[in-house]
Image: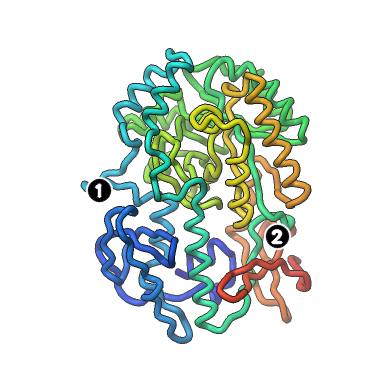
Amino acid sequence: MREVISDRYRCPEQFAGAPLAAPTSAEDSYFRFGRDLACYGRSCSGASAASSDQHLSDLLAEVRRGQPDVQLPFDLTQLVDNLTHERYLTRSNGSFQRRGPNPLLARLYYALRRFLPAPLRLPIQRTYFRGWDKITFPAWPLDVGVERLLEKALLLSMKSRGIDAVPFIWFWPDGASSAAILTHDVETEQGREFCPRLMEIDESFGFRSAFQIVPEGRYRVTAAFLGDIRGRGHEINVHDLNHDGNLFRDRRLFLKRVKAVNEYGRRWGAKGFRSAILYRDLDWYDELEFEYDMSVPNVGNLEAQRGGCCTVFPYFVGEILELPLTTTQDYSLFYILREQRIDLWKTQAAGILEKHGLLSFITHPDYLLDRRAQSLYRNLLDFLSELGSERKTWIALPKEVNEWWRQRSKMNLVPEGNGWRIEGPGKERARLAYARLDGDELVYVPDTVAAVAS
């Protein structure tokens, strides 16, 4: 428990929590921790729900509020790992569920996708996603289960130990309230041709974006094309190998293809990766030679591979930093949901901002060719401009978020006089904050007295 809380907050270990109450069960199951916080993992209570749709036992009453430490009826680290690594996506035989409700249909569809005109694709997609709005876990349209779980555990620990405030290193540099990244996945020749215009649109709002480029089979990737993106201050990442949806189909094929994927990353100087169609298996990520990945959605109801990491913050998968997709993709918004406004993006943003997390967006130049889509995209950029000026949101490139989060993960708070000092590379941009008790809530308060770094 100490490790998972100190990793998120970068607080001194003496504030980070307590051990388990008792040995946990051998089986994972679903249960609640409070009225509406669903969890999945091993517990000390004998909870046995195999599905989130069943009646879930509430283990909040099982918490032992002894002195000096609170004791939880589960392993907090395991629960967080089960969510962020999507460990709850298992079948009865224990194999990982790499596809959605109809994997054969998905495989056939993506094999023929490039040959199907949009009017023929939409009915197939809507059939595939039928019932997406009935999924209860992860919670649509945004799941912050990891944040709520960590906050509740820290709050219980603070109450048990009589602590009113816990010092920690603020989540974002220079006191930013949250962060946001814009990413563009380039899937077709038409999309590639639209990239210069899309850069102009981003630049007109003062933004720079990350372009995920498919190395093989889709379009010509010239040095001039890549150089233009870099030269204008945007970022290049590797987008799968050939975007056929088969990279994570089986282990043998993955090991063969990942060598080429890694080679393109080295050749292009790319620090980041995103798989096609957001297919993924986090247990295989140790073969990827990138600093960060952007393939895991917060909630995947409208993705070909269901699931979701239930967090709006970056997290490590081994040595790779995951920057989760925390908002709905543009295609799903424009064509599956047939939205005419960006209200869903705004709703998701509100929930992310409340937790001071990372807003991450995928838009495709391939789907921004018509005026309607461009108008909606400009509305998004205008909205982000307001967040930057009014809410102090840090609009950054993914590589900048990666660099900051890695630096922060190595920073420490050390006592100095009556306050605290931040130590570690990048400390000049770090800020001290406090997690304070406010009745039964945990609130974050920036430090306005103590020196922040020296």
Q: Nearer the viewer, mark 1 or mark 2?
A: 1
Contact flag, marks 1 and 2 (Cβ < 8 Å): no
Residue at x 38%, y 74% (from the top left corner):
20
Residue 353, above or below 191: below
Quarter of the rendering containing residue 63: bottom left
Query: Can residue 261 be seen in this snapshot?
Result: yes
Residue 109 image label:
none
Taking the image as shown, residue 434 lies to the left or right of residue 125, namely right
Task: Please say which color scheme the image uses.
Answer: rainbow
Residue at x 48%, y 49% (from the top left corner):
319
Q: Secondary structure at mark 1?
A: loop
Taking the image as shown, residue 176 lies to the left or right of residue 247, namely right
Residue 452, above or below 103: below
Q: Quadrant of the N terminus?
A: bottom left
Q: Which residue is mark 1?
A: 94
Query: Can residue 266 be seen in this snapshot?
Result: no
